[in-house]
Image (cartoon, rainbow, N blue to C red):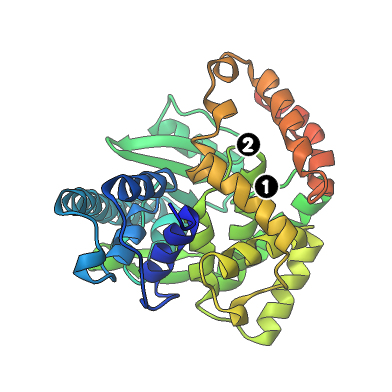
Amino acid sequence: MNYNFYELFFKLLRLGIGSEIYKDFPDLSNDEWNRICFFAKKQAVIGILTDGIECLPSEKRPEKKIMLRLIDLCLKIERTNKKLNSKAAELTLHYKNSGFTPILLKGQGVATMYPRPERRMPGDIDLWLPEGREKITEFVKKEYPEAKALYMHIEVKPEEGVTLEIHNVPALMYNPFAFRKLRKMMNSWKDMATELELPDGAGKVLVPCYEMNRVYMLAHKFRHLFTEGIGLRQMMDYMMLLRKGFTEEEKDDTVKKLKDLHLDVFCRAVMYVLTEYLGMEKKFCLMEPDKGAGERLLDIIIEGGNFGKFNVERISEKNKKRSLLGKYIAANIKNIRFIGDYTNEVLWGPYFMLYNWIWRHTR
């Protein structure tokens, strides 16, 4: 190839989300198209990639066989989105009628911010019930006796092909002082959730206000950076949120909160990836992009794929055989690479993981 593979890949994503208008594109071989499609699947953005390809003139698109495969994948994504939208609305009503205030996090709510919501690759359904861990655990255990309560959530499978995470807290941080501030913020936002009508008349759900999402979604990605990993789908979700806009006053308030949580360096790194690679307009930046931190973040994203599922160390047989404490120790060793950019969180990591291990083994 006499061009940059990633440059073309990101160009197609920008076309797919409407942050770039088609001007030109080289002729690619079948092998090159297959490589691009594989990478899009790895990052869980195959639907967005297809939207980008559909912006190309017919002579620039891949051969019919590849296009048919892409269309088939998109139809599956659309069917899954439709199923999860209906299930999210159904579960919302169920927990609301049971005395809770279910707030739909990320996923199907964020998808509605995309130009074509049905093409966003869906994942789990995440519901935040702010009524408290004990009440949530007691209720969920009656419905799903086999469910195991973790520190942040309880994971259940209400039906085939659907995974539900019921959160008692939307996100956490290793630094206990920052975590306390985050929980206080969440508590102030729980009554500011807004009602959203999901596509195709699936039903209504409550979703976080934009103010909460600007902080929560970044904190959530930050946590995944230190655990499983993050991918381009998570970056695009945040971009779709920011492109909804905000006032200068709202921006200043968000920036203050992010700095209080020691998320400013990560925010600058994310801003760099969003503007330099995904084409987000500078007017939607919360902070000045940081090229160094941004490139290092992009390396992690490209290496691990969606939620780090392709990380070599994570999927190795050696890692699978480790105990929970062994995995924690390995994770802390791995996270040392972040100490230059995210010193505060790296240093608090061992404390939180030990605390979490003790918590899980004393319940």
Residue 43: tell me if it is visible.
yes
| Quarter the C terminus occupies | top right
| Dot 1: element | loop
- Looking at the picture, which amino acid does disc 2 mark? Tyr
Q: Residue at x 46, y 49 (%)?
A: 126
Quadrant location of residue 149?
top right
| Dot 2: element | loop
Marks 1 and 2, the one that precedes in the sequence: 2
Front in this rendered view, residue 345 or 314: 314
Front in this rendered view, residue 306 or 295: 295
Marker disc for residue 32: none
Residue 245: percent from the left, percent from the top?
55, 81
> Which residue bears the numbered disc 2?
151
Q: Is residue 273 left or right of residue 347?
A: left
Question: In the rendered image of this protein, does residue 245 appear above or below residue 178?
Answer: below
Quadrant location of residue 205?
bottom left
| Nearest to viewer (mark 1 / mark 2) | 1
State yes or no: discs 1 and 2 in contact (Cβ < 8 Å). yes
- Looking at the picture, which amino acid does disc 1 mark? Leu
Q: Residue at x 46, y 31 (%)?
A: 141
Question: In the rendered image of this protein, does residue 107 appear above or below residue 159?
Answer: below
Question: In the rendered image of this protein, does residue 284 appear above or below residue 215?
Answer: below
Marker disc for residue 172: 1
Front in this rendered view, residue 264 or 24: 24
Q: Residues within 10 Å of mark 2 (few under 14, many from 20)?
A: some
Residue 86: percent from the left, percent from the top?
27, 55
Residue 52: percent from the left, percent from the top?
33, 65
Q: Is residue 219 left or right of residue 74?
A: right
Residue 306: percent from the left, percent from the top?
48, 45
Front in this rendered view, residue 65 or 43: 65
Q: In 3D space, how far apart are the residues under numbered discs 1 and 2 (Cα atoms)? A: 9 Å
